[in-house]
Image: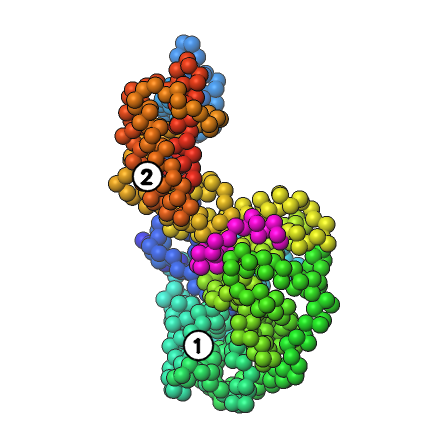
Amino acid sequence: MAMDLLLEIGVEELPSASLPETINELQQLTQLRLDNYRLHYESIKVMSTPRRLTIYIRDLAEQQADAHIENRGPKKEIAFDKEGNPSKAGLGFARGQGIDFEQLEIRQVGDVEYVFACKIEIGNATTDILTELLQGIITSVPFPKSMRWGDFSLRFARPIRWLLALYGSSLITLQIENISSDRYTYGHRFLSRGKLEVRDSQQYFQQLQEHYVILDQDQRRDLIWQQVQKVAVDMNATAMHNPDLLEEITYLVEYPTAFYGSFSPSYLQVPSEVLTTSMIEHQRYFPLYDKENKLMPGFVGVRNGSDYSLEVVRAGNERVLRARLEDALFFWNEDTRQPIEVMTRNLKDVLFQERLGNLQEKVERLAVIARYIGQQLSLGDPDLINRSAALCKADLLSNMVYEFPELQGIMGRYYAQHSGEPAEVCEAIFEHYLPRFSGDNLPTTATGTVLSLAEKVHNLTGCFAIGFKPSGSQDPYALRRQALGMVNIILSQQLELDLKDIFAAAYDCFEMVIPDIDKTTAVNELNDFVLQRLRGILMEHYSYDVVDAVLANPSGNLADLQRRAWAVNQLKQSSYYEDFMVVYNRANNLSRKWEAHSYSAEVLIDDSEKYLYQQIKEVRPRIEQAVEQHNYILAIQQLADLRPALDAFFEAVMVMVDDETLKAARMGMLKQITAYCHFIAQFNKLVQ
């Protein structure tokens, strides 16, 4: 009879950041091991708190499924001698498989006959293999970071302190280093005392619930958010919706209790981002907002325990936060005693990168690159671009950003506003870091857009020039993220920008650096690197063959490549798709290896080829104009309309004639049609 299996690995407090990934890995590992052991089950649920990892398997079969094993042996002609008797090779194969020679089967594989050993391996009782299975799971759990303890060789996220393993009500014997499995678990560290005896899985869940442990992380997450919202509503406020913070707290507590805390309204003179960062990053509190969405002098904290002596807990948390906010207020007052420009005087003392110089040198290069991009796009005022570039790194020298590095750019905007800088400059200082992560906002101002692109172009070009390119999972300078940010900015605003020109201009700014690669190589590698990020974005909307066809025409204009992808995708769904592909395939297949592009139309002799020539001549300016205006659909339609003339041409004449001049003219027309198609994409990559 199928029974439930329960495995609890009791540990010292696990790091909350890695627990979601660990749960997922443990779920997949358990499922794989059970499948490999041919054990049927109804469901697997992996649960975790800071002190335990629990695997709960519903209705695990009491016996392995029988295995039908088929092993192929030697060829029939080798397994039997000339008289048809078993050979040494055949007998040896049968003996090795543990069966009689007469039990071997002869089967044909392709054109050859082989002998096969077919047998059924009877499954073992589940209780006989659970020790091996569970110990294999425990010792194979992957962690981002693991450790050893004592004199033991096992690596785990944290030291293992107890093991509980039950199949139904039977104890499974496990031995992991100095820890043996037993029938005991432990409740909440502070609200429960001593061992809790467990008879079966149902009693296990009951014991934990009675002793202040909410085991299921999904249930715990929902409960925390409900409590936080209730506390906020009671204070006539709204709690910040922060999924990352909620996830972190979920894996920091076993029995959550939310509570309200407050701080002095005098701290609200500090920018709200500073206060919320201090509450979230340092204290794991949920900030509160009033009905006008203004930050309130209050927060919601979550305690790992019951509501016992909650006033004492509240007072302690308020005292700790007060010290944090007092520091923030001090930093704010100190930083705003002087204009933001004063902070830039020490940029030369801060190293950007060993071979790429200090921050002052970076700022000077940024200004040059930003002005060039602004000029190419006719975007932004040069004076505002210069001023924004000069001030964009100033806040890195501030006390506040030194304490809260994640506020770079944000504090720069506040300091610039406090110093009376133009609004466009203030916003650009903040926006030049955007986007900072996946799904983040993109720059909206002209100066911010130009400076953001310049920042990313600078970092990419400088790192590639000195050989600091991402490899595998290694990307210490976050170049992939910055390249993806560039792509998103360009596509969102449909900026007509040739990246090859931009990278070439940026490369020239590093004249004081001795590069590892030459300019041409660097520019091509950079363009390809960015196109790989574009490819990923396009694949979210179009099929792989459409993306391949478009990107087969190298270009540094990302917005134009996106438009081409849209047009090619529209083509595949259009009524003229077949006509266009006939025109393209017939022209391309025959002229693919033809090198010459020029030809003389005067040698054409048949009416069909003269008519085709005339059609090509008439359609050429319309196609070129459509391509120039990025109207690729119109260009494709013009090419599709050539089908009747092209069909008549192939029916009337033979292209590969002995007359070289006539053959050149006919091939030249086909080559010309192919070239017009390749203005848009390499259509031979489409799956038809």
Spot occupied by residue 343 in the image (x, y as percentages of width and height):
67, 74
> Dot 1: few (<14), some (14–19), or many (≥20) neighbours within 10 Å?
many
Residue found 58% across the figure and 44% down from its top: 524
Quadrant placement of the C terminus? top left
Residue found 32% across the figure and 39% down from its top: 638
Q: Residue furthest left?
A: 575
Residue found 29% across the figure and 36% down from its top: 641
Q: Decide whether the magenta segment is chiefly helix, strand or loop.
A: helix
Q: Is residue 588 magenta?
A: no
Label 2 element class: helix
The residue carrying mark 2 is 638
Q: In this rendered view, identify the residue nearer to me: 98 or 39.
A: 39
Horizontal placement of 509 versus 641: left or right? right
Q: In this rendered view, identify the residue nearer to me: 81 or 670.
A: 670
Rendered image: mark on residue 596: none
Horizontal placement of 662 versus 14: left or right? left
Q: Please say if 615 is above or below 496.
A: above
The residue carrying mark 1 is 240
What's drawn in magenta, residue-wise?
486-506
Spot occupied by residue 125 in the image (x, y as percentages of width and height):
39, 48
Horizontal placement of 137 versus 209: left or right? right
Query: Which quadrant of the structure image shows residue 617?
Result: top left
Q: Is residue 490 magenta?
A: yes
Query: Which quadrant of the structure image shows residue 216?
Result: bottom left
Q: Please say if 206 is above or below 630.
A: below
Q: At label 1, which amino acid type do we have?
A: Met
Q: At label 2, which amino acid type do we have?
A: Gln
Q: How many marks?
A: 2
Q: Earlier in the sequence, mark 1 or mark 2?
A: 1
> Dot 2: few (<14), some (14–19), or many (≥20) neighbours within 10 Å?
some
Q: Please say if 363 is above or below 87.
A: below
